[in-house]
Amino acid sequence: SDLVIFCNSGGWGNKPLSSDYQGQSWLTGIMANLTQLGYKPCVVDDIRTGDGLIEHLFEFKEDLTHYSSKAKVLAAKIDFLTQHIANLKVIITGQSNGAALAGEVANRLKDNSRVYSIQVGIPFWHRVHEVSNSLVIDNSGVGSDALTQRNLVAIIKSNWGKLFILNHAPAFTPVDWCISRAFLILTSYNFGLGLQAPGHEYMWEYPGVGPVIEAFLVKNFDTQ
């Protein structure tokens, strides 16, 4: 393969990007466009969080510290590949928290002209780096993304019932309070309690997603 796509899913990052219907839609679009441009892309899923409480706590820490450790490790792997495989090009792509990690990796490799990134829906608490060879999408074209635009009112309104559950979980001591809330937050997605954000949906068919990514690929990968 002459091009590798490193994929980072949203949320905890413990599943392939292709397992999410949104990520699958634009990953399929990216693959199809690169194939039309004459490339033979290879997809690598970067599963950044394993099973267990310790893994999730480490991911939580990384999320708060701009992926200081995980970005360094992934950047080193990609840099090694491009140094040892002539003419290899790399695209780092990610969704939501995965997009934030992709951005941090791209920033570390900003002097490597064969590394590109496509970052979709970075949450507002993460940094957004202005790096050449990178595409940052924060609006799907069909509505404002409350999570990228820091619309806290919209987020609270959409999750009022779930926040009520988190706030009223039983606790007898401050330690109980911390443990119960941590447990609910870390397991919320398993019980359908994952917090939602209006507009934080990115399908290939949306005007701010597919056409924008396609233009980016043609600009940077068209060999004609």
Image (spheres, rainbow, N blue to C red):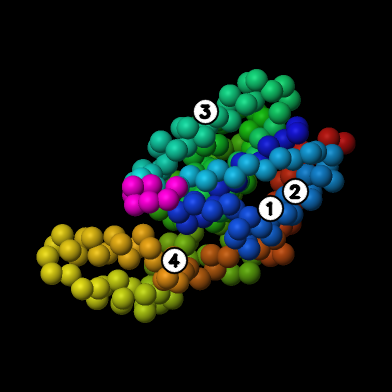
Give residue 150's quadrant in the image: bottom left
Magenta span: chief secondary structure:
helix
Residue 205 lies, with reference to residue 74, above or below; the image says below
Mark 3–mark 1 distance (CA, rounded to whole Å):
24 Å
Please tell me which of labels 3 and 1 falls first in the chain: 1
Q: Which residue does the numbered mark 3 point to in the structure image?
A: 76
Residue at the spot x=42%, y=41% of the render?
67
- Which amino acid type is shown beneath numbered disc 2? Met
Q: The C terminus is located in which quarter?
A: top right
Bounds of the magenta segment = 50-57
Residue 16's disc is none
Q: Which residue does the numbered mark 4 point to in the structure image?
A: 190
Which of pointers 4 and 3 indicates the residue nearer the eye?
Answer: 4
Mark 2–mark 3 distance (CA, rounded to whole Å):
24 Å
Q: Which residue does the numbered mark 2 point to in the structure image?
A: 31
1 and 4 marks in contact (CB < 8 Å): no
Please tell me which of labels 4 and 3 falls first in the chain: 3
Q: Which residue does the numbered mark 1 point to in the structure image?
A: 27
